[in-house]
Image (spheres, rainbow, N blue to C red):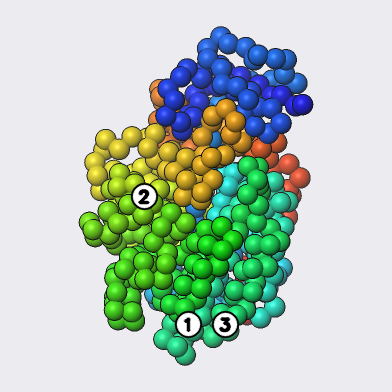
Amino acid sequence: MSRIWIKNPLALYTASADTQDVSGGLVVQDGVIAELLSAGQSPAAPVDETFDASAHVVTPGLINTHHHFYQTLTRAWGPAANAKLFPWLQNLYPVWARLTPESLDLAVTAALAELLLSGCTTAADHHYVFPAGLDDAIDIEVGAVRRLGMRATLTRGSMTLGEEDGGLPPQSVVQDADTILADSERLIAKYHSTAPDADVHIALAPCSPFSVTREIMAQSAELAARHGVRLHTHLAETLDEEDFCREMFGLRTVDYLESVGWLGPQSWLGHGIHFDDAEVARLGAAGTGVAHCPTSNMRLASGIARVVELEDAGAPVGLGVDGSASNDASNMIQEARQALYLQRLRYGADIPVERALGWATRGSARVLGRDAHLGSLEVGKQADLAFFRLDGLRFSGSHDPLAALLLCGADRADRVMVGGAWRVVDGEIPGLDLEDLVRRHSAAARRIVMA
């Protein structure tokens, strides 16, 4: 059995309610946290490897709850650079309709590599664009996740309302319900695992109220309940969406959610900004999760989510970088910093650094239904760890290592471990030719907007 001692970290954030002294580090055995050590304490049994973490702030692996990997191909694209959500989508949908298996694989690999280098070990992706020839989009994503040795919740998204039916996307990327449901069943059977160390979870994710019918929302909820998988969608991201729900369905967004069988702990919502007091309480009582996406929300001027109130009401709250066309980066440690600052802007400067890190770790794990095994550093949990050095110029003069991680703006992990295996070493991903990836990904990005 392999045993690794992560020894004497500069600081260790456990994301756990337990306040025990853990300054001696932790022991990883066969991919699981086997011991937490206090100052001066040694492992209970011999170890095979000792890693001196005295220059590192160690946190649980960061967890991203909302992304669109394919959008790395359309970052900072001029025609959509200064638009609000609906015109932004109308500009980009025809571009995304040109996705190919090759370009998607490059896009997903680029997104995952960027996340991994930022300390992220688990990511949820919302893929809902299936043009002709891209029926195996989720299979392509599974391959990329496994090549990089990460974990992911891959959501089989869907759109059924095209422009001809009053929706926003072109007809070339919408699908009929039978196709969507059959592929959802296939993916669950082929890839979904409930094992503690599972690398892939599958979830079902109709895109949004303005791009799918009520029927596919309800049918997805029934299918998810049958197979014990989770549900995900965009909700209450903008006031335009609220207006759309009222005009199309005669309901506010949370009423609509309840009407199609989604209001419960099996669901999590991308953005979740425009809820009133009663809706915050209902979501909390139902245990419905929210993926807070601060950078995207600022980029598109969508609003500030009420995540402190949502969390206090009982709703799980995690963080998402959102798509790389509305954030333009896939960096989880930076997203935690943005969440801290945006929520301080709403609620005051006494929102603690630790609370923002909690959203990025245990909160996100709870949102994805993986908090029994991920999201905190506790004995018996998976050894998913992020290591950050504080010896750069941006940290010079800092005093509290944990506070410095966000306040001084850490942007890259020095090491990352997933299930006890090193996936980032000295700021690099072993086995990945990053220069070649950037070259090929950039070429694919040029092709998709010029076609």
Would you place residue 187 above or below residue 96 in this image? above
Amino acid found under the numbered disc labelled 2: Ala
Residue 138 bears which disc, if any?
none
Cα separation, mark 1 vs mark 2, equals 30 Å
Q: Amino acid at mark 1?
A: Leu
Q: Secondary structure at mark 1?
A: loop
Tell me the quarter of the image containing the C terminus: bottom right
Is 337 displayed left or right of 148 in the figure? left
Foreground pick, 20 / 149 = 20
Of discs 1 and 2, which sits in the foreground?
2
Q: Earlier in the sequence, mark 1 or mark 3?
A: 1
Q: Secondary structure at mark 2?
A: loop
Q: Which residue in the rendered view is the most extreme toward the front? A: 226
Cα separation, mark 1 vs mark 3, equals 9 Å
Q: Nearer the viewer, residue 428 or 346?
A: 346
Percent position of residue 404, x then y: 42, 31
Q: Position of residue 131 (x, y in %)?
A: 62, 78
**Residue at horizontal 58 percent and vertical 66 percent from the top:** 156
**Residue at disc 3, secondary structure:** loop
Which residue is labeled 2 in the image?
315
- Quadrant housing the N terminus: top right
Against 181, residue 423 (above or below) is above
Q: Residue 81's spot in the image, x, y percent?
A: 43, 68
**Which residue corresponds to mark 1?**
161
Q: Earlier in the sequence, mark 1 or mark 2?
A: 1
Mark 3 — residue?
A: 176
